[in-house]
Amino acid sequence: MKNFEIELKETGKIIEKALDFYLPKSDEYPQKIHEAMRYSTFNGGKRIRPVLTMKAAELFGLQGDKVIPTACGIEMIHTYSLVHDDLPIMDNDDLRRGKPTCHKVFGDAIALLAGDALLTHAFNTIAKNARIEGISLQAVIDVIDRISRAAGSLGMIGGQTVDILSQGVTIDEKTLFYMDYHKTGCLIQASLWAGARLAEAPAPDLNKLDRLGEKIGLIFQIVDDLLDIQGDEKKLGKPVGSDVRNKKSTFPSVYGYENSLKLVKNLSEEAKDIIHEFKNGEFFVQLVEFLVERQY
């Protein structure tokens, strides 16, 4: 696992260097919005989604650096969602990864616009993948189509909407799975799919990665729910218990804590079974184990 974490960090550094290149510079007018965009993007983070994009491409023989524009665009979309999630009208969080959230530093209006700008700039960045040698224009079009659906009302935004509407009410298991898969899993699933599609992976393999992405997305969200109950605030970089305070429906509140742990275990085994269908999938096996055991 140590070697995996080193590889994860090294890949993360490559992504951060690329993000610095693709984002507008902080001294570019109007400076305040670009400062806010960069503050939120470089405010820590595991870079799981862009790493998935690069590693999925490598799984099918394409160098990871060939898909960096798409990987960076996906991370921008993820960052925008966090900026908006933290706003007072949403989760009203003061800390993100141990640092003041964007709206606490720049104010609500600039934070809102920073999120909007990151989302818009993401697709400008993804489109640049068409300029990379060896990448087909059709693959980039397919990726933009897939990511836009994953980030919109049929994906992440849809899940967040159900999350808001479910606060303070009892929901059934079907609604819970829809909510958590869409608000977290859709973008994770699209991250895997995008890297593989840019590498011209065959349709049956793309379908397998869709199933894998669904499992990984649910694992990620359920563990998030569990950490909000018994996580270490110093490691998490934010206060625990916000789900209870906001009267949110979560896997522990619907399934119970112990049953949620069992569900994570079952999902991880199902994910590994899918990974074993690919050659050279050891990184993804270790990634699943990392997500299950993570403390932050």
Image (spheres, rainbow, N blue to C red):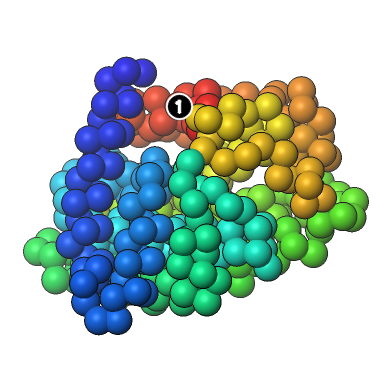
Looking at the picture, does residue 264 appear above or below residue 135?
A: above
Please name the amino acid that badge 1 sits on.
Phe
The mark total stands at 1
Residue 123 visible in the snapshot? no
In the rendered image, which quarter is residue 23 located in?
bottom left
Q: In this view of the protein, which residue sits in the foreground, 285 or 169?
A: 169
**Which residue carries the number 1 mark?**
290
Q: Position of residue 236 (x, y in %)?
A: 53, 35
Q: Residue at x 58, y 58 (%)?
A: 86
The quadrant the N terminus occupies is top left
Q: Secondary structure at mark 1?
A: helix
Residue 225 visible in the snapshot? yes
Q: Residue furthest right?
A: 170
User: Quick one: label 1, few (<14), some, or many (20+) residues within 10 Å?
Assistant: some
Q: Residue at x 66, y 50 (%)?
A: 180
Q: Position of residue 40 (x, y in %)?
A: 40, 58
Q: Is residue 102 left or right of residue 238?
A: left
Q: Position of residue 211 (x, y in %)?
A: 52, 45
Q: Residue at x 45, y 67 (%)?
A: 106
In the rendered image, which quarter is residue 90 located in?
bottom right
Q: In this view of the protein, which residue sits in the foreground, 258 or 229?
A: 229
Q: Residue at x 58, y 32 (%)?
A: 233
Q: In this view of the protein, which residue sits in the foreground, 98 or 24?
A: 98
Q: Position of residue 74 (x, y in %)?
A: 38, 60
